[in-house]
Image (spheres, helix red, strand yellow):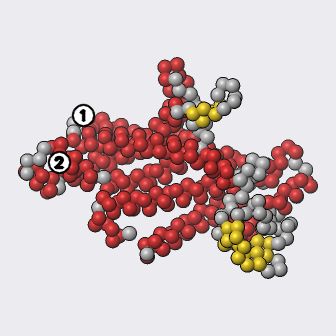
Amino acid sequence: MFWFWKKLGNILITLFGVVTIIFFLFNILPGDPAQMMLGQNENSEQLLALKKKYGFDKPVFNQYLYYLNDLSIISFHSKDPENISFLKEKKYNYLNIFENKNSFLVLKTPYLRDSYQKNGVSVIEIIKNTLPNTFVLAFASILIAVFLGLFLGIIAALNKNTWIDYLIQVTSTLGMSIPSFFSAIIFAWIFGFVLSEFTGLNMTGSLYELDDYGEQMKLQLKNLILPSIVLGIRPIAVISQMMRNSLLKVLSKNYITTAYSKGLSKYNVIKNHAIKNSLNPVVTALSGWFASMLAGSVFVEYIFGWNGLGKEIVDALNKLDVPVLIGSVLTISIIFIMINIFVDIIYTWLDPRTKNNF
């Protein structure tokens, strides 16, 4: 029970910090979201009306408190229709707890507000439309990274100090040193442009695209190939080196020597004893690398035109669409936290001795 409350407290502190940093950061940077929303049609009356509608006319700290109130599951709301916190049924999904003359106290689902740039489209709707594409991309990348990384790490360990080992280590170092956005540009240009006649791949494209007649959305799995490979390059390099080092350490243990002395074949010793005990550091690193993939997808999705949450974050940054930005980053933070909890559980299964540490 203590473990649960400790984790819950860490989650709330992390999410509070994310919201606070992003909110104040984008309120001290130059630029006016209201002016960007109006564009060339701006006039003083429209600008004032828009600022009042979204609360831009209030002090920054007051805007921050209103935003926290919207995010909270228990919140206060005004009965004044002119107030930004006015309780609209179409706006909030709530259950009334208490009310007085001027306000309500309600239990509600967190409200991430509407996009500033997409004509009232809710942030929740934007996340629902883009997050599955990012999940598909990250999942495909992690599968490629795990299988190739483990395979190369095992091959390197079993061929220690040979040319195969040196080649894998040099390639891994090169893979770790190249940023994802640079790899994305190179892969898109070579395989999506120069060699497109042979590969059949496009420089840009998403998981679903309109057909040639513009009538329906069609699944385009080929558009997944390049971004998933690019996003998996660095994790492949890290996993292969970690697996190599971990496996070499395990192979030097006394119980491995004992297994050989009992007449077990090299294949059975490695398969049944060495590999499982070598996976602990790799599994621990996977949680961090999955989060890195979600972060790296911001640039990869934008370069490849992949309609995911990362591309949405870049668009929100360009347009100062703060609700979309905070909602997207909060979503990634929650996913990262849940993955860490899941990895903790897997780690205790692989090594029961660590159970008391969580």
Specify whether 36 is left or right of 243: right
Q: Which residue is mark 2?
A: 269
**Residue drawn at the location 31% of the way across and 66% of the way down:** 354
Q: Which mark is residue 193?
A: none
Within the image, what quadrant is residue 27 found in?
bottom right
What secondary structure is marked by label 1? helix
Q: Which residue is mark 1?
A: 163
Percent x, y of residue 318: 69, 46
Specify whether 103 is left or right of 6: right
In the rendered image, which quarter contains the C terminus?
bottom left
Camera-nearest label, 2 or 1: 2
> Disc 1 residue type?
Trp
First in sequence: mark 2 or mark 1? Answer: 1
**Residue drawn at the location 68% of the way across and 53% of the way down:** 123
**Residue drawn at the location 43% of the way across and 59% of the way down:** 342
Specify whether 198 is left or right of 352: right
Percent x, y of residue 143: 41, 43
Quick check: 283 above or below 105?
A: above
- Disc 2 + disc 1, Cβ < 8 Å: no
> Disc 2 residue type?
Val
Q: Is residue 109 visible?
A: yes
- The Cα atoms of the two marked residues, 2 and 1, are separated by 24 Å
Give neighbour class at mark 1: few <14, some 14-19, many 20+ (Cα, 10 Å).
few
Within the image, what quadrant is residue 3 found in?
bottom left
